[in-house]
Image (spheres, grey):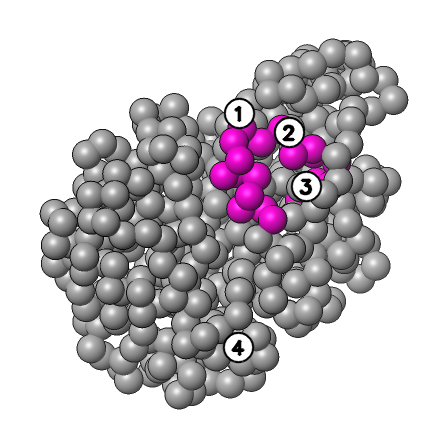
Amino acid sequence: MTSGRKGPLYVLALAAVAAVVVFAGCGSSNKSSSSTSGGASTTKTNASVKGKVSIVGIWVAQEQKNFQRVVDAFNKVYPNVTVKYNPAGDNTPTVLATALSGGRPPDLASVGQPGLVKQFQSQGKLKDLEFARKDIESNFGPDVVKLGTLGGKIYSFIPKGANKSTVWYNVQAFKNAGVTPPKTWDDFLKDAKTLKASGTPAYSLGAADGWTLTDLFENLYLRQAGPDKYDQLTDHKIKWTDPSVKTTLKTMADVFGDTSNIAGGVSGALQADFPTSVSKVFVNPPKAAMVMEGDFVPGVVAGKTNLKPGTGYNVFDFPSVNGSQPAVVGGGDNLIMFKDSPAAEAFVKFMASPAAGKVWVANGGVSSPNKNVPPSAYPDPITRATAVKLANASSFRFDMSDLSPASFGGTPGQGEWKILADFVKSPKDVDGTASALESAAAKAYK
């Protein structure tokens, strides 16, 4: 982005996610006449727009099912547009790069890395979204618009956001152990040992998906090193061999080194993807007591668990470390366009509407940055509450790995993802891990 990777912009931009709990809108256009599932109002049927829209995106498993509900709602408005979605998951950057090099990009894509959006735009690969400026500016805060603006034109926006500073836990596991949600990291570690003694491993790690490990690092680093250092490391203005990085790696080792307290042990963690790590907690009896991940966790197991919010599972804020103030690491999925057409434009405009946001959040696990999606659209108090944390945080930063070059922060089998997975296996090798991270970062940031 033209603004670079400066933290304050992202503080304001993603804080707009929390606006869903403040601003309540009708969620309908001037032609609103009917409703779809999830309580989303839609415009009158528009049969004049015809064509096909291809989309490559990061949404898989339950997230893909939730997105399909949005597509279904779109098709109620545009029945003559066929939408084909290709779920690429963590391989989305590679899939898109291959498609572009072959001259066959999709019409649209969803990517989790603003840095990747900037890369594609600088290469002249993206179409701007100026045709939807009015829709985007009407439904999103000005700083969200800035986040997607490059060279004075809008190239992306975030229809789906996330608070990544949450820990989800199995209520019965906590009751059996006699522990309550901890507020500090020291209590967190102490409670983890108590949980283990009660018969349930404390941690469920989805280390097969390297981004879950970067999320843990970022939450700890923001609390230990502070927002200024976070920004410097994001921009690679300080090296990954900096003492602040090593301090956080040592803190991560408090978890990784407690191998008998990890569901499935080290090998189980390295073989478990993110959905699997969630399913181990959201089951009765639980295979693990808690999973450290974002507010999208419940959406992963929606329809697959008998546990109810509040009584079966619950959430607490990522703990304070050494007296750190409340802080939130957040992320968002960026919608971008490679090929323009009336059908693709119609889909982009729909995705920017409250109607799409209502359908998407109705099943939980999603925070909509659309300020006109009312709180009532969320399925339960827990889901609504996690969005509030974004506005209440003393410090907020966008996901660091998503702001990094994709080769370092967003590609399976290399960069941060691989190096931190190796760290799970060798948590005592702090110096070696820091050196490996610096070597990969130096290459990627050239």
Badge 1 element? helix
> How far is the residue under mark 1 from the one under mark 4?
39 Å
> How far is the residue under mark 2 from the one under mark 4?
35 Å
Local packing at callout 1 (Cα closer than 10 Å; few below 14, some 14-19, many 20+) is some
Confirm or deny contact between disc 4 and disc 3 (CB under 8 A): no
Badge 2 element? helix
Which residue lies under the disc numbered 4? Answer: 226
Residue 96, percent from left and from top: 52, 47
Query: Foreground residue, 129 or 303?
Result: 303
> How far is the residue under mark 1 from the one under mark 3?
22 Å
Quarter of the image with the N terminus in it: bottom right
Which residue lies under the disc numbered 1? Answer: 68
> How far is the residue under mark 4 from the one under mark 3?
27 Å
Which residue lies under the disc numbered 2? Answer: 376
Query: Foreground residue, 306 or 87?
Result: 306
Residue 159, percent from left and from top: 64, 41
What amino acid does circle 3 point to?
A: Val
Residue 41, percent from left and from top: 72, 20
Left/right of residue 287 with respect to residue 206 in the rendered view: left
Earlier along the polypeptide chain: callout 2 or callout 1?
1
Say if 59 sits above or below 245 in the image. above
At horizontal 45% and vertical 49% (from top left) the residue drawn is: 294
Earlier along the polypeptide chain: callout 1 or callout 4?
1
